[in-house]
Image (cartoon, grey):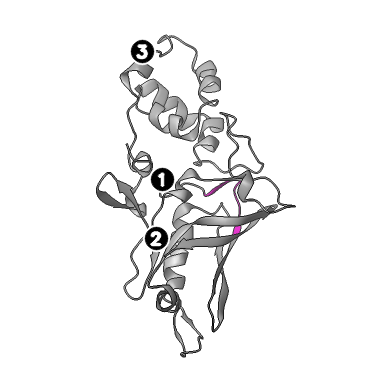
C-alpha cells in the first residue's frame, strides 16, 4: 500500500494483526487507552478491525485529537513516541505536530488552470476534497492563523510573499490547499510585468510542486512555515 493511499480510505489491518485483537468484552474505556498509544497510520488501520473499534476511535476525545479530527488547545505528544517534526522547527518555536498527510499531498503551481490538491491511491488521483481526511485539522494543537512564506530566488530577482490562512476553529488541510489554489492565480509584480503567481514560478523553473513545509514556528495559535517545493 502506498503511503498516501492510507488517507483515501480506511485501510484493513493484516490478518496476523487482527488475530492479536483483544477479547470482545474488553472494556471500551480501557481499549481507548490502549489505542491512544498507536501511531496515526495504525489508528487509521484500526478503524477496519471491527465496528466496536471504529466506534471507539470515532467517539473517544483523546483518539479524535490523535486523528486530527478534534481541535486541541495544547500540544499532545504522539502516542507511539515518534519524534514528529521536531527537526523542521526553528529555534524558539513552541512544539507542534503537523498532519502526516502534509508530506503526501500533491499540489502543483502552474499556469492556468491550477489543479486541485490530490492524493495518490495506487494509480488513481483522489482529490483531497473527496478523501476521508479533507476536513482534518492540519496541526496539534490547532492553530487559528497560518502564514505560509513562498520564496523563489533567481539571478534577476527574489519572488517572496506570504499567504495567510485563517480559521477560528482550527486550520484544516482543505483550508490550506484551497487558499494556495486561490493564491496561485493572484497577480504579482515581476520584472516581466504583472502575472499570476503560479506563472511567475513556472517561468523560472518549468513548474513548482508543493513538497511540504519547513522552518516551522508556532507561537500560541499562530503558525508560520516556509513552503518547500520541487521542480
From mark 2 to mark 1, how far is it between C-alphas?
16 Å
| Dominant secondary structure of the residues highlighted in magenta in the image | loop
Residue 225 colored in magenta in the image: no
Mark 2 / mark 1, whichever is N-terminal: 2
- Does dot 2 land on a helix, a strand or a loop? loop
User: Taking 226 as reference, is 61 above or below it?
Assistant: above
Q: Point out residue 158 in the picture as x, y percentages from the top left corner.
A: 57, 78
Which portion, as a residue range, is magenta?
A: 138-145
Residue at mark 1: 133
Mark 3 / mark 2, whichever is N-terminal: 3
Q: Residue at x 47, y 46 (%)?
A: 136
Query: As rendered, which of 40 and 205 lies closer to the eye?
Result: 205
User: Taking 49 as reference, is 170 above or below it?
Assistant: below
**Front disc: 3 or 1:** 3
From mark 3 to mark 1, how far is it between C-alphas?
28 Å
Q: Point out residue 72 in the picture as x, y percentages from the top left corner.
A: 61, 42
Q: Residue furthest left?
A: 123
Which of the image's four quarters has the C terminus? bottom left
Q: Quadrant of residue 202?
A: bottom left
Q: Residue at x 34, y 35 (%)?
A: 10
Asked if labels 2 and 3 touch by Cβ distance under 8 angstroms, the answer is no
Residue at mark 2: 107
Answer with left or right where residue 72 lies relative to residue 4: right
Residue at mark 3: 19
Asked if labels 1 and 3 touch by Cβ distance under 8 angstroms, the answer is no
Q: Residues within 10 Å of mark 1 (few under 14, many from 20)?
A: many
Q: Residue furthest front?
A: 155
Amino acid at each position: 500500500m502506498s503511503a498516501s493511499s492510507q488517507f483515501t480510505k480506511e485501510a484493513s489491518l493484516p490478518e496476523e494483526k487482527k488475530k492479536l485483537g483483544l477479547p470482545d468484552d474488553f472494556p471500551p474505556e480501557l481499549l481507548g487507552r490502549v489505542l491512544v498509544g498507536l501511531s496515526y497510520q495504525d489508528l487509521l488501520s484500526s478503524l477496519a478491525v471491527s465496528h466496536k473499534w471504529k466506534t471507539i476511535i470515532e467517539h473517544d476525545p483523546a483518539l479524535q485529537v490523535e486523528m486530527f479530527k478534534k481541535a486541541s488547545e495544547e500540544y499532545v505528544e504522539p502516542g507511539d513516541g515518534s519524534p514528529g517534526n521536531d527537526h523542521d522547527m526553528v529555534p524558539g518555536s513552541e512544539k507542534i505536530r503537523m498532519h502526516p498527510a502534509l508530506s503526501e499531498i500533491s499540489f502543483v503551481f502552474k499556469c492556468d488552470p491550477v489543479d486541485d490538491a490530490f492524493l495518490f491511491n495506487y494509480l488513481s488521483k483522489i482529490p483531497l476534497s473527496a478523501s476521508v481526511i479533507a476536513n482534518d485539522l492540519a496541526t496539534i494543537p490547532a492553530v487559528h492563523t497560518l502564514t505560509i512564506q513562498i520564496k523563489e530566488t533567481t539571478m534577476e530577482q527574489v519572488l517572496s510573499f506570504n499567504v495567510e490562512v485563517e480559521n477560528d476553529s482550527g486550520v484544516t488541510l482543505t483550508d490550506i490547499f484551497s487558499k494556495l489554489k486561490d493564491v496561485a492565480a493572484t497577480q504579482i509584480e515581476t520584472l516581466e510585468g504583472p502575472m499570476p503567481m503560479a506563472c511567475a514560478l513556472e517561468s523560472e523553473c518549468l513548474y513548482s510542486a508543493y513538497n511540504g513545509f519547513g522552518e516551522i514556528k508556532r507561537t500560541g495559535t499562530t503558525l508560520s512555515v516556509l513552503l518547500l517545493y520541487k521542480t
